[in-house]
Image: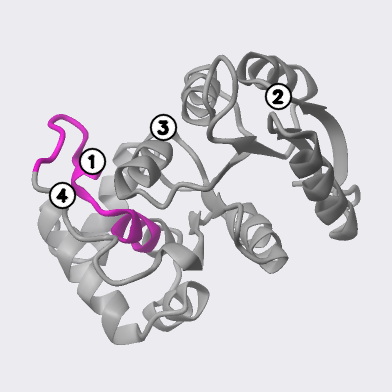
Amino acid sequence: MDQLRPATVVLADDHAIVREGFAALCAAQGMQVLGQCADGQSALEMVQTLQPDFAILDLHMPGLDGTEVVRQLRTRGCAAKLIILSISREENTVRRALRAGADAYLLKDGPARHLRDAVIFVGEGGIYISPLLRGAGLFTEPQERPAGNPLASLSPRELEVFHQLVNGLRAKDIAKLLDISPKTVDTYRASLFRKLNVHDLVGLVKFAIDRGLTTT
């Protein structure tokens, strides 16, 4: 991202008061709002046309929902950081958004600082999930795992740790960013090593490079 200009953003939500609220939050953080819209198809077209640095997309919109907008944008090679905004805390909903290509999942009832944290975190190549979703049992392993994509077997939290490890962060730095203990990071790391059939960090980085999953 060009550090000499403000970060740019497109906002999509079918409630004007929500859009305006997030526009004010973005402006307060020095971001430039390029456009706002109220439905999924308009969001898809607006992001492709305006090419913002970030897009904040409501999960439930008329026409295409936020996850489908994310999926289509990624299919078309969109490089914007895509943030899903929702009231849903359902684990499978979070998983679908992340697997579609979302960089962050925020809750509408979360504090304003979560938007700030998400913008900073995903701007540096991370995946951000609202801390309000980090309750006990939310990120347990699914009973059934989709076949084909190796990353489909990872929980949302394991995906967070995966991306930070392959981008060079140490366990203590990941722990600080995700507000968990270094021991918990080690637990997630061991689990994703097992699920991806790699034996060390070098193998994990090679796994990511071979699949184009690194940000450098």
Q: Is residue 185 visible?
A: yes
Q: Which residues are magenta?
A: 144-162
Amino acid type of disc 4? Pro
Residue at (67% x, 55% y) in the render: 119
Amino acid type of disc 2? Val
Residue at (28% x, 50% y) in the render: 206
Q: Residues within 10 Å of mark 3 (few under 14, many from 20)?
A: some
Disc 4 vs disc 2: which is toward the camera?
4
Per the model, the C-alpha gap separating discs 4 and 3 is: 17 Å
* Residue carrying label 3: 100
Using the rendered view, name the quadrant where residue 23 is placed: top right
- 59 above or below 29? above
Secondary structure at numbered mark 2: helix
Q: Is residue 2 visible?
A: no
Using the rendered view, name the quadrant where residue 136 is placed: bottom left
Secondary structure at numbered mark 3: helix
